[in-house]
Amino acid sequence: MVQPQEGSVIGSGRSADEVQLQPVPRLEWSLATEAHPPALEAAKPASLRRSWIHTAPEPQVLELFRKLHGAKRRLPAPWWLRALDRGELPSREAAFEVEDEVHAVLRARPGWVFVPWAGTGEAGYWEYAPSDRAPMQMPTTVALTDEHNGWLNVVPAHHDPEPVAIPVKGVAGLVAMLAQIESW
């Protein structure tokens, strides 16, 4: 392969020693969702809100998401950003309130553990430790979702490869169902 000599002109009138950057959408989004600085302790959803998508002005976050998300809708994003993009949430702050309310309810009950390692930019999820018993391979889990306007799904303890998530009608619905959920 022949390399242009320093100072020579390449097709577009640029010299060979100029650096030309091309946007890489997935890399740009990865940087936008990466926590800066990384959370050293993630004991609650709020401790994970350290990335650009959590702290930049909301209109800029939505603009970048819409620009990179495209027609295929395959960009990994937090539940609240997808709902906000569709106009189903009034603000990012409203989503954070939902996350914090769920955490407050489950933290107050014995056996619930917050698990911070979820998908890109996600808030984490909660597991009910007493349900982690044989023959179950996965404990009962409460996760945030944009699949419905209740924003919560519960997955009972299971050993199936594809368990069925049960939609919950918001934090009030979670509180009403907790005794049942904890009995699974």
Image (cartoon, grey):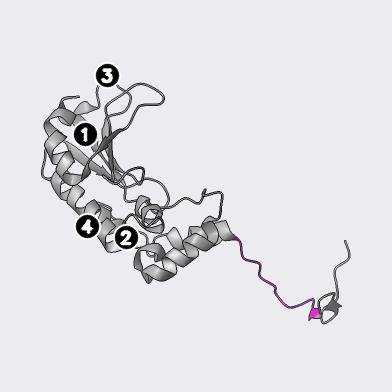
Q: Establish if 2 lies above or below 150.
A: below
Question: In the rendered structure, which segment of residues is drawn in magenta?
Answer: 14-24
Q: Establish if 101 lies above or below 28.
A: above
Quickly name the residue at label 2: 49
Q: CA distance from mark 1 to mark 4?
A: 22 Å
Confirm or deny contact between disc 1 and disc 4 (CB under 8 A).
no
The secondary element bearing badge 1 is classed as strand
Q: Quadrant of residue 18?
A: bottom right
Quickly name the residue at label 1: 128
Q: Nearer the viewer, residue 88 or 181?
A: 88
Residue 148 magenta-highlighted = no
The tag earlier along the polypeptide, 2 or 3, is 2
Q: Amino acid at mark 4?
A: Glu
Residue at 79% x, 80% y is 15
**Residue 134: numbered disc:** 3
Of tags 4 and 2, the one toward the viewer is: 4
Of tags 3 and 4, the one toward the viewer is: 4
Q: CA distance from mark 4 to mark 2?
A: 12 Å
The secondary element bearing badge 4 is classed as helix
Rendering coords of residue 42 (x, y %): 28, 53
Of tags 2 and 3, the one toward the viewer is: 2
Quickly name the residue at label 4: 97
